[in-house]
Amino acid sequence: MKLNVYADRISQPSRAVVFFCKVNGIDYEEIKVHIPKGQHLTPECEAINLMQKLPAIADGRFKLFESHAIHIYLAYAFPGVADYWQGCS
Ligand SMILES: N[C@@H](CCC(=O)N[C@@H](CS)C(=O)NCC(=O)O)C(=O)O
């Protein structure tokens, strides 16, 4: 199952997670959520992140928010990511 990244490119931490995936060749799907339209406040987004903030990810049934935590998770969970990213917090 593909990694889902919930993000709005106006959000710096969202961009950081999207770029991390791109730079490291992670197969992901970006779910574009428009903050100014309040799309991050919908039940679908709340189901991913109770705090209703972006970015957030869903990797199968596993859900995570907070961009630094996401970076660390991706660095360990995806084998193609170089080891040096594991200290990127
Ligand atoms: N420390 C969090 C910051 C999350 C955050 O505050 N995201 C903002 C966008 S940059 C957001 O979702 N704002 C919507 C709101 O507060 O309603 C992270 O690094 O992920």
Image: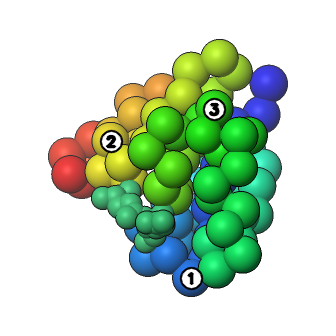
Up-down relation of residue 42 to residue 75 (above or below): below
Name which of mark 1 and mark 2 comes first in the sequence: 1
- Residue 29 x, y percent position in the rendering: 78, 49
Give the amino acid at mark 3: Ala
Examine the image and state in which quarter residue 12 appears.
Answer: bottom left
Q: Secondary structure at mark 1?
A: loop
Residue at the spot x=52%, y=39% of the render? 49
Give the amino acid at mark 2: Ala
Q: Which mark is residue 69?
A: 2
Instruction: Say which residue label 3 marks.
Output: 47
Q: Which mark is residue 10?
A: 1
Up-down relation of residue 47 to residue 14 (above or below): above
For the image, the number of numbered tags is: 3
Q: Quadrant of the N terminus?
A: top right
Q: Nearer the viewer, residue 84 or 12?
A: 12
Name which of mark 1 and mark 3 comes first in the sequence: 1
Name which of mark 3 and mark 2 comes first in the sequence: 3
Is ligand 1 within 8 Å of the beta carbon of the residue shown at mark 1?
Answer: yes
Mark 1–mark 2 CB contact (< 8 Å): no
Mark-to-mark CA distance, 3 and 2: 18 Å
Give the amino acid at mark 1: Ile
Are there few (<14), some (14-19), or many (20+) residues within 10 Å of tag 3? Answer: few
